[in-house]
Amino acid sequence: MTTQGGTTQGGTMQGRDFGRVVVVFGGHSAEREVSLNSGAAVLAGLQRSGVDAIGYDFAEDGMAGLEALKPDIVFIALHGRGGEDGCLQGALELAGIPYTGSGVMASALGMDKLRTKALWQAAGLPTPESIEMTAATDRAELIERLGLPMIIKPVHEGSTIGITIVRHLDELEKAWQDAAKYDARVMAERFVVGSEFTLSVLGDSALPAIKVEVPNGFYDYEAKYLSNDTLYHLPCGLEPEQEAQLAELSLSAFAAVGCSGWGRVDVMRDAEGCFWLLEVNTVPGMTDHSLVPQAAAHAGIDFDELVVRILADVKERN
């Protein structure tokens, strides 16, 4: 599906300066539906801002179809595998087409939760202990090491797809099997009891932190995209010095993976007030439930300005 668009009346010179922008979304990953919604929102925002933008579902004809559209810049709204794991970024690099967000290596690393955590540990940044889990992993030893509850999740999926909180030994095997449906590699992670925060990054700056409150205590796929009961607290409720600490930690985590442009870092704060890095998202959602647009709005940046700023960052870097 290619969605036609164009320059709207009243569009800014800044919008027209980008040339032809193709918003890439859809694809074949487990996050396809979220990506379709993100892409539609981004496309509409760009068009309202006067950008000559069209949409392209990557599932239609892959890279060949994208190149045929002759983009000057690609806005990547393709979530999950193929879109935020370095594959699309690498193909665009070879084609000489500028694109939004992180580069090849940072995208690949950010998609791999275990490698991301290894980088953070090497940089001295706090992240919960984790272990790769296989069919041969001794389940009792795993519990002895990480304790209960623990998180079982695919190494390479986003949107909390395939994630389970395990509270008892007899739940471990099913949790591993559920995660293994989505990925050949599965990880177990120590569960941090506390409050969840997310910190959005735009360029070199941190946007206001958001505290996420979920009635069932777990920010899963339904809570992220379908539920109207999930609460997003802005301001986040932290004292100014605590929020500054969270911002500094998140920017350090973003930089340690080599990320650039824009993204999001998810963090837990335990009962003692310590922050723990969970993961980085190099192509965050841009739906009406998504966190980056909410954080930007709280900083006085409306959605249309947000997507234009993300494009402007590409021009500055190229």
Image (cartoon, grey):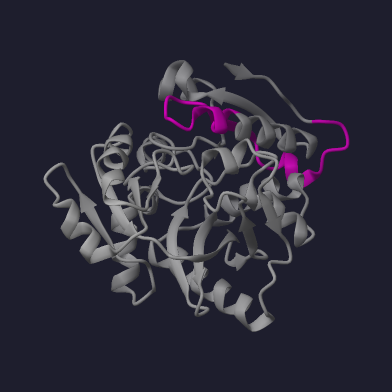
What is the x, y in percent for residue 222? 56, 38
- Residue drawn at 50 percent across, 28 percent down: 32
Asked where in the image residue 36 lies, by quadrant, the reply is top right
Q: Residue furthest left?
A: 136
- Residue drawn at 30 percent across, 64 percent down: 147
Q: Residue furthest right?
A: 10
What is the x, y in percent for residue 189? 32, 58
Q: If the image is split into quadrants, where does the N terminus sit?
A: top right
Q: Which residues are magenta?
A: 8-36
Compared to residue 1, the image places residue 209 above or below, namely below
Q: Is residue 26 magenta?
A: yes
- Residue drawn at 37 percent across, 35 percent down: 91
Compared to residue 145, the image places residue 295 above or below, namely above
What is the x, y in percent for residue 104? 37, 47
Compared to residue 183, the image places residue 244 above or below, namely below
Say left or right for 149 vs 146.
right
Residue 307 makes an appearance in the image? yes
Asked where in the image residue 136 lies, by quadrant, the reply is top left
Numbered marks: total = 0
Say left or right for 16 vs 129.
right
Residue 71 makes an appearance in the image? no
What is the x, y in percent for residue 317? 53, 56
Q: Nearer the viewer, residue 166 or 72?
A: 166
Q: Is residue 312 magenta?
A: no
Compared to residue 28, the image places residue 183 above or below, namely below
- Residue drawn at 33 percent across, 74 percent down: 123
Q: Residue furthest bottom?
A: 241
